[in-house]
């Protein structure tokens, strides 16, 4: 692995443009609020949280060679991430995500990750052709992977020898992309981090609670599953144990990035030797702190 790196984060690294208002909103609402532009994307959100927990992530992603891309790479480095192996495209623009949030939660969002999808397997070259890994000596560390990659590429990862020894943690980019994770049910190679809706899409049924959903994902072939349900219960399930906890009650002031924060906090807790029960507790507290707005935006 790259010197001083603790984990690879593979997937979307882009600019988040997010409008937030303290008002309840509906379709057609026109209200005062704040608009921010921040480094974002699932892989980036996970990496930022890992840095806060003392880990050093290496990014594998596609970022344009445009001025926005240069600014984004500089921001990643400043935040404490290794960008040595980022694929910089000469003909693809830097990706963006735009969301509107009100007091009643996420109103709408559009993810423009077309450059990451177009780059495809090029972002994985350092894992296959070195220096992070080779066909005969695959990478053996932790990998956080997001579902913004194409289904074809995710299917390739699910069976590729380059990932056979990795501790692979996977999350969908959104409910709309949840079914892209189906290859990891077929091949039982990864820990899946999903919410209740995403679990339902993967299993093609509705669930009333996180425990039922987590057990169903195991039945469908998942190696391990962590299922969240907002302020309701969260469950971690594997062949060894099924544990369910309820998150702390907090006032929700933001939601974009909450699932990524949960996943990163759980990875960091386990990396520090926490038990199954304690790792889930730490992840739920980190996510609750995040949605309450008690950490920097």
Image: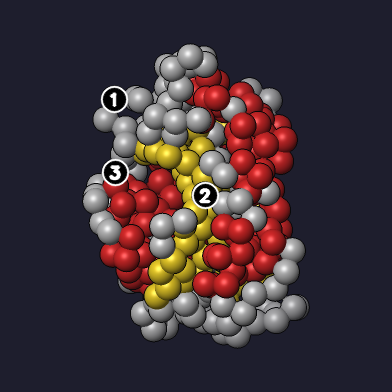
Say which of 288 and 213 sits in front.
Answer: 213
Within 10 Å of disc 2 (Cα), the crowding (few <14, some 14-19, many 20+) is: many
Whether residues under marks 1 and 2 lie with C-beta atoms below 8 angstroms apart, the answer is: no
Residue annotated with mark 1: 3
In which quarter of the view is residue 26 placed? bottom right
Q: Is residue 241 above or below residue 12?
A: below
Secondary structure found at label 2: loop
Q: Position of residue 152 (x, y in %)?
A: 72, 35
Say which of 175 and 253 sits in front.
Answer: 175
Residue found at the very far front of the displayed protein: 240
In which quarter of the view is residue 281 placed? bottom left
Figure quadrant of the C terminus: bottom left
Secondary structure found at label 3: loop
Which callout, 1 or 3, points at the residue further toward the start of the chain? Answer: 1
Residue annotated with mark 2: 223
Q: CA distance from mark 1 to mark 2?
A: 29 Å
Q: CA distance from mark 1 to mark 3?
A: 13 Å
Which callout, 2 or 3, points at the residue further toward the start of the chain? Answer: 3
Q: Is residue 205 above or below residue 71?
A: below
The residue at 44%/17% (across/down) is 137
Secondary structure found at label 1: loop
């Amino acid at each position: 692995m790259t010197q001083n790196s603790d984990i690879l984060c593979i997937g979307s690294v882009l600019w988040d443009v997010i409008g937030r208002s303290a008002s309840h909103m509906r379709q057609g609402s026109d209200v005062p609020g704040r608009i921010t532009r921040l480094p974002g994307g699932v892989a980036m959100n996970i990496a930022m949280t890992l840095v806060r927990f003392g880990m050093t992530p290496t990014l594998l992603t596609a970022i344009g060679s445009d001025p926005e891309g240069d600014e984004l790479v500089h921001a990643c480095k400043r935040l404490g991430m290794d960008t040595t192996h980022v694929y910089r495209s000469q003909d693809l623009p830097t990706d963006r995500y735009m969301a509107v949030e009100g007091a009643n939660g996420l109103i709408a969002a559009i993810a423009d990750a077309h450059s990451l999808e177009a780059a495809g397997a090029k972002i994985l070259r350092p894992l296959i052709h070195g220096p992070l890994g080779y066909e005969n000596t695959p990478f053996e560390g932790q990998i956080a992977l997001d579902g913004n990659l194409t289904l074809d590429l995710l299917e390739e990862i699910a069976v590729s020898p380059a990932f056979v020894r990795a501790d692979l943690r996977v999350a969908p980019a959104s409910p709309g992309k949840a079914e892209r994770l189906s290859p990891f049910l077929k091949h039982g190679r990864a820990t899946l981090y999903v919410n209740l809706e995403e679990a339902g899409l993967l299993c093609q049924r509705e669930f009333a609670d996180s425990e039922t959903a987590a057990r169903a994902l195991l039945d469908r072939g998942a190696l391990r599953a962590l299922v969240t349900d907002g302020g309701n219960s969260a469950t971690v399930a594997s062949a060894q144990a099924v544990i369910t906890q309820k998150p702390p009650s907090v006032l929700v002031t933001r939601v974009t990035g909450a699932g990524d924060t949960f996943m990163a906090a759980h990875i960091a807790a386990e990396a520090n030797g926490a038990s199954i029960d304690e790792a889930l507790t730490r992840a739920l507290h980190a996510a609750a702190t995040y949605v309450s707005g008690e950490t920097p935006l």
